[in-house]
Amino acid sequence: MSDAKNAAMNDSVYDVVVVGAGAAGLSAALVLGRARRRVAVVDAGTPRNAPAAHMHGFLSRDGMPPAALLEVGRTEVAGYGVELIEGRVDHIEPGFLVHLTGGPALRARRVLVATGLRDELPEIPGVRERWGRDLLHCPYCHGYEVRGEPIGVLGTHPGAVSQALLLQKWSADIVFFPHTLALADGERERLAARGVRVIDGVIKRLVVDEDRLRGVELAEGSVVPRSAAFVFPHMLPQDALLTDLGCERDENGWVTTDPSGRTSVSGLWAVGNVADRRAQVITAAGMGSAAAIAIDHDLVDEEVARDVEDYRTAEAKSPASLRPITHAISLEGRRV
């Protein structure tokens, strides 16, 4: 397809609209911008990891503030002509008319959703205030930073037991607070074998002094000194844009995708935490890149099919006298 034809086709239609400008969305936009696609990224400015001061486990970016990564990413994608739009997508019509809350509607050939997930925290005083600071979630993201410290694990989710078993590598002083979680005998044995102390009782609050976590107070009044704590939040994918368009879910309620992030709805991709709760920043970035390549291939396939159809139509309409004349050539090189 000629550049002029491509530009004319794209005057009012984006090749791809990306919803969400975290690591997944921006990585996808970067690859697509470099592929000379017309791309818009719509972002509401509420990243999941905003409370965290630093991110870890991202090769070459270990310890970088999450906001700094996004700032660099936005600058990079803008350099390739990607349009960055501040706003929230209200809904997407079939056929990919992307409606912004209180704003315009963007028409797209393909849509990539990277809206992440929401962490639902237990209603314990102090939890929300300390979240992302000295109340943490991922041992692989934050365990090293609290190595050797007295650590508490709040038993507000079945996954908390696994957290406590993992954390023993970073500290020999781990206390598991079952809270309202009923532990099976086998779980208590595993914790004990790992050197994790179990202190029963309902958690009343996190004790904070001078803007630092100092301990966990139980309902009966005792305080167990701790300088860091871990909690396993209930993770809720922000996937309404996907499910409203009819995307299939798996047995756990998460939207199903193929390895490239393609959903069950043609032309619609989902990457990052909206599709995989385990995705860390570096994982989400890779998912965005893989999806972008798959989307570009999908667009090229569509364009080639259209160009072939146009070519055949033009061939059929052109006078026979203007068509290229071909001759069969014999083995001796003579025309026949």
Image (cartoon, helix red, strand yellow):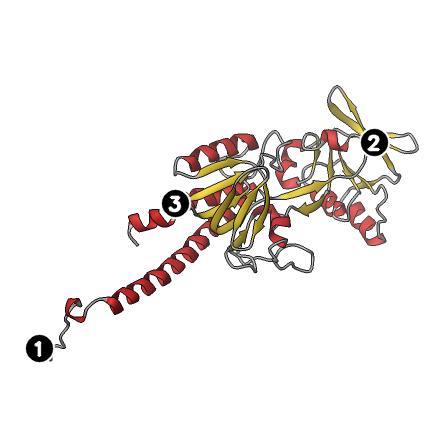
How far across and down, in percent of the image, does residue 91 sit?
A: 60, 47
Query: Which of the 4 quarters of the picture holds residue 39?
Result: top left
Q: Which mark is residue 335?
A: 1
- In terms of secondary structure, where does tag 3 sit? loop
Q: Residue furthest top?
A: 210
Residue 168 visible in this rendered orientation of the protein:
no
Label 3 CA crowd tier, 10 Å (few <14, some 14–19, many 20+): few
Q: Mark 3, mark 2: which one is toward the viewer?
A: 3
Q: Relative to 188, does residue 63 appear above or below in the rendering?
A: above
Q: Are marks 1 and 3 in contact (CB under 8 Å)?
A: no
Q: Amino acid at mark 2?
A: Arg
x then y, percent, for residue 113: 55, 48
Residue 196: image location, x then y, percent: 78, 41
- Residue 57 vs residue 237: left or right? left
- Residue under label 2: 205
Residue linked to disc 3: 11
- Outermost residue on the right side: it is 220
Left or right? Give the position of 22 relative to 2.
right
Distance from Cα at disc 2 to Cα at disc 1: 94 Å
| Foreground pick, 203 / 316 | 316
Q: Residue at x 76, y 46 (%)?
A: 161
* Mark 2 Cα-neighbour bin, 10 Å: few <14, some 14–19, many ≥20: some
Image-quadrant location for residue 152? top right
Structural distance between the alpha carbons of marks 1 and 3 = 49 Å
Earlier along the polypeptide chain: callout 2 or callout 1?
A: 2
Q: Earlier in the sequence, mark 1 or mark 3?
A: 3
